Amino acid sequence: MIVHDLECKNGHIFEGWFDSGSSFEGQIKKGLVACPVCDDTSIVRRPSNFGIKKGNRPSLPMPSDERLSPMTEEQTMMAHIGRKLYDFIEKNFDDVGCDFTREALKIHYGVSEPRNIRGVSTVAEEKLLKEEGIDVLKVPIPPEKDSTDA
């Protein structure tokens, strides 16, 4: 799974989650990616602030910095709890993708049946949900399990 920062021609910035780079390109060419704010399909990819390592590609050597240290026992425990929480959400919540705000509003106002949902939203959409009295929990995607994990 890869995440791209996207922008429509109206300047709305949002995230898009795709199975692969080719999946992203194919959906863009077919006009299947739309801005969650204005439904514009003239979407461009923006530079992202982060990258996610996928697979067993060789990693770049880490700079020698005495400030970098192995994770403490508490950090390891928190990472484990974060992974468990994410796994639970992934298995028990409907993935509505970019329609998260729309679906949350429908559920809130009784248009749709109540259910657990997950997806993506923009900062503006998160503000709207808060103004409407809808509580949202943002959960970061934890790094993939290391092959040495039990």
Image: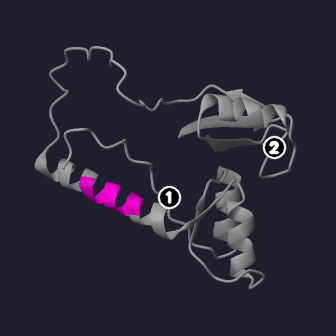
Q: Quadrant of residue 67?
A: top left
Magenta stretch in the rendered image: 80-87
Taking 6 as reference, is 103 above or below it?
below
Q: Residue at x 32, y 15 (%)?
A: 60
Asked if the residue under mark 2 is in contact with the one under mark 1, i.e. CB atoms within 8 Å, the reply is no
Q: Secondary structure at mark 2?
A: loop
* Figure quadrant of residue 19: top right
Residue type at the position of mark 2: Leu
Asked if residue 78 lies left or right of residue 104, the reply is left
Q: Residues within 10 Å of mark 1 (few under 14, many from 20)?
A: few
Q: What residue is drawn where x is 28% and y is 59%?
A: 81
Q: Earlier in the sequence, mark 1 or mark 2?
A: 2
Q: Is residue 112 above or below residue 148?
A: below
- Magenta stretch containing residue 85, yes or no? yes
Residue labelled with disc 2: 32
Badge 2, how many Cα within 10 Å: few under 14, some, many 20+?
A: few
Q: Please tell me which residue lies in front, 53 or 110.
A: 53
Disc 1, SS = loop
Question: Which residue: 60% across, 78% down?
Answer: 115
The image quadrant that residue 119 belongs to is bottom right
Q: Is residue 66 left or right of residue 112?
A: left
Residue located 31% across and 43% down the image: 145
Tag 1: amino acid: Lys
Residue 131 percent coordinates (x, y): 68, 70
Q: Magenta region, mostly helix, strand or loop?
A: helix
**Picture coordinates of residue 133, whole percent (x, y):** 64, 76
Comparing 8 with 54, the one in front is: 54
- Where's residue 45, x and y in %? 70, 29
- Identify residue for label 1: 138
66 or 16, which is in the foreground? 16
Rounded to the nearest whole Å, what is the CA distance between mark 1 and mark 2?
A: 25 Å
